[in-house]
Image: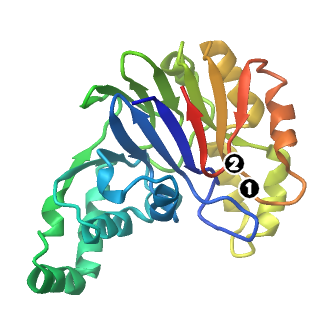
Amino acid sequence: MTDIITLLGVKGGPAIRPGSNMPTATLVEMGGQRILVDAGLGVSRSLCAQGVALTALDAIIITHLHSDHYLELGPLLHTAWTAGLNRPVPVYGPPRLSQYWRAFLTSMEDDIQLRIEDEGRPDLAGLVDLHPLASDDVITLGDVRMDVLENHHPPVVPSFALRFDDGAKRVVLSGDTAPIPAMVDFARGADLLVHEAMLVEGVDALLAKTPNGDDRLKTHILRSHTPADQAGRIAAEAGVGMLVLNHFVPDGLPGFPAVAWEAAVRRTWQGMLIVGEDGMQIVL
C-alpha cells in the first residue's frame, strides 16, 4: 500500500460557516494500516468521500479533548457498527476520553439495546478497545510505530503530537499546539510535517464572528496556537522534507486566502509547502 496522508478536515475550531472547511481529522495510511487521527464534525462523511469504509479503520487516535477533535467519535463508531463492524477497534486518547465514551453509550442505550435484540448485532461496547495515551508512549500499530509527544495547548492537558514511522517514511502531526522547542527534535528528518497554523492578524476577524465569547477566547487562541511563520521555522530547524499546514485559525473568512498563509510561512521556510484543504491527499 502506498503511504498516503489525507486531510479530511483542516479547520481550526469547532464552528462551521458557509465557506469554511470542516474541523480537524487526518487519515494516515502507512504500513498497510488505516489510522484516523481526530474525529471532528463531518469525519464520517469525509472518510466515505475518500472511498474508505468506516469498518476499515485499523485504529483511531484522539489528540486532545477539544470538541473539534472528538465530537464525532461516538457517532463514527456507532455508524461503523450499523455498517457491519464486527471486530474490536483500538482507540487511543487522553485518559478522560473513556468518560466521553461511557456517556455516549448511555445516551444511545435505547437504540443500541434495540439493535442487539432486534437485529442480532454484537454489543457495541465490546467493539471499542480504549487505551489512554501518555507523553513518550511508543505504540505499535501493525507495521507502524507511533511515538507520542505532549505538546503545549493550554489550558487543555494533555494534548499530543504524533509521529508515525513504517520503516520507509516518517510523518509527524503537530496536533494543536503553541510553538515548542521539543517539536523540532520530534519532527527532525521527517518526510512530512503536518503543522497547525495561525495568522495573528486574522484573530480579531475571527472574534468578530464569535459574538458569544469574550477576551478570554482571544487569550486562548493567541497562547495555544502557532503563528504560521513559526510553523515554518520549526520545519526548517527540523529539516523536514515537506511542510503541510492545517488547523487554520482563522478559516473560511474573507481576506485570508491561501497566498496569505504561504507568504507568512515563506518568511522562515523555503522548502516544499502545501496549504491544506479538505479532502487533499498527500502521497509520500
* Label annotation for residue 25: none
The residue indicated by pointer 1 is 251
Label 2 is placed on what type of residue? Phe
Q: Residue at x 64, y 67 (%)?
A: 15
Residue at the extreme right of the image, as rendered: 255
Q: Residue at x 65, y 14 (%)?
A: 237
Quadrant position of the C terminus in the picture: top right
Q: Position of residue 114 (x, y in %)?
A: 16, 86
Q: Say what secondary structure mark 2 lies in.
A: strand
**Badges 1 and 2: C-beta atoms under 8 Å apart?**
yes
The answer to whether one can see residue 254 in this image is yes
The answer to whether one can see residue 153 in this image is no
- Crowd rating for badge 1 (residues with CA inside 10 Å; few <14, some 14–19, many 20+): many
Q: Find the distance from the CA under tag 1 to the CA under tag 2.
A: 5 Å
Q: Position of residue 198 (x, y in %)?
A: 73, 43
- Crowd rating for badge 2 (residues with CA inside 10 Å; few <14, some 14–19, many 20+): many
Q: Pick whichever, 80 or 105, lies toward us.
A: 80
Residue 43 left/right relative to 126: right
Q: Residue at x 79, y 30 (%)?
A: 265
Quadrant position of the N terminus in the picture: top left
Classify 130 as above or below 120: above
Q: Position of residue 26 (x, y in %)?
A: 50, 45
Residue 140 left/right relative to 258: left
Q: Residue at x 77, y 30 (%)?
A: 229
Label 1 is placed on what type of residue? Asp
Q: Say what secondary structure mark 1 lies in.
A: loop
Q: Pick whichever, 174 or 51, lies toward us.
A: 51
Residue 148 left/right relative to 235: left
Q: Position of residue 172 (x, y in %)?
A: 50, 28
The residue indicated by pointer 2 is 248
Q: Pick whichever, 38 or 182, lies toward us.
A: 38
